[in-house]
Image (tube, rainbow, N blue to C red):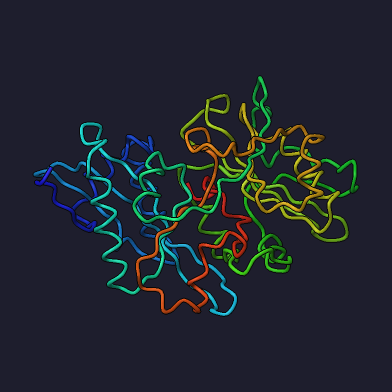
Amino acid sequence: MSDYRITAYAPRHRNAVVEFQQMLWQGGARGNSAYFDWKFGDNPYLDDRYVTLAWQGSELVGMLGVFGSYWEVDGHGRVMLPCLADTVVAPAHRGGPLFGRMLGWLVDRLRADEVPWLLDFGDQPAGPAMLMSGWTAVGPWPVASAEREVSGREQGAWDAQEAVRGPRSGATITPLANSVPEMPAMAAKLDTRGSVRVVRDEEYFRWRNANPLARYFHLVAESQGTVGYLIAHRTAVDTDDGPTPTTIVECEALDDDVWRDLIETAVATVPGKVVTMWVRDLAPAREQSLGSLGLSLTRPSGRLSQDIHLPKLVMRSTGAVDGDSAPLSTLTSPEVWDLRGVSGRGWR
């Protein structure tokens, strides 16, 4: 249609956005409002300036959310890259030009502001159309999952559960309500597997943990100090036995035995009928042990229609990259990315 009007978000649009996003966020007026503030207003890397709205007359019919993420890029230092999220098009307007028009308008704004890339980690149904319109994909990659007939956790507070001893490592594994400084400190010390990686510092952990529509489950492994940690995510708008998965968004450890003990403990104790995790950046020995930990792998088939819901990164250059030899010009190469700690559900 030719009568769409596309605008940036402004505070006067808040009520319309909160109501419109009930289709996706499902948090009600209070929950949706708090989630908007957390993801776009309180994001430590970017404000809500690139949130894009589409109108037909006075009716909100489309939205692209854009939040900030912070990356370390070898040869370039730290850089903010915006991420596409929370895409919603009203049912009567799907299958037409609106999604593409919103994206084009957004990319033009980013280019004018010299922001070089737009990232998307979602299982975007419009992924094929995005690839045909200039987006580049890294992935898809395998996922590991475990299915349980009942919730893996008894009723009660997560951090009220007793600590357990890892059968391989002997480390004490304790459930915690929140992250602790040892977690980002450990993440910062680990060897990287690529030249581009998310900044996992205390500010990042603190912001992520404040998600009002999520529940996070933390495990810390200790043996004469902290030797590993795990963080799992579950949406707060579904019950423990509901259909959404619980996602292990991070698991880091100083050795393989601690890592295996953390994964096995999480699979046995976190809530949800399905527990899932990305395996893209696992060392081969850890990936090979997943079956013994109760997880099965789903690998890409190579057929776009079957792989549409497997995780992947799609990215769009805005045309603002400063030359083919610049560090940010290489982001389309899969080898440059270390995506540990970046599971899409970790940001939902």
Q: Quadrant of residue 164?
A: top right
Q: Residue at position x 65%, y 48% from top? A: 231
Q: How many numbered discs?
A: 0
Q: Where residue 196 appears, x then y in whole percent?
A: 58, 67
Q: Where residue 31 appears, x then y in whole percent?
A: 38, 41
* Image height of 74 relative to 165, above or below: below
Give 72 or 20, whichever is nearer the viewer: 72
Give 223 or 188, whichever is nearer the viewer: 188
Q: Where residue 276 appears, x then y in whole percent?
A: 63, 37
Q: Where residue 188 appears, x then y in whole percent?
A: 68, 68
Q: Quadrant of residue 22?
A: top left
Q: Residue at position x 38%, y 39% from top? A: 25
Q: Residue at position x 74%, y 51% from top? A: 220
* Image height of 277 relative to 50, above or below: above
Q: Quadrant of the N terminus?
A: top left
* Image height of 241 relative to 235, above or below: above
Give 195 or 39, whichever is nearer the viewer: 195
* Image height of 257 relative to 149, above or below: below
The residue positioned farthest toward the top in the image shown: 149
Q: Residue at position x 42%, y 42% from top? A: 124
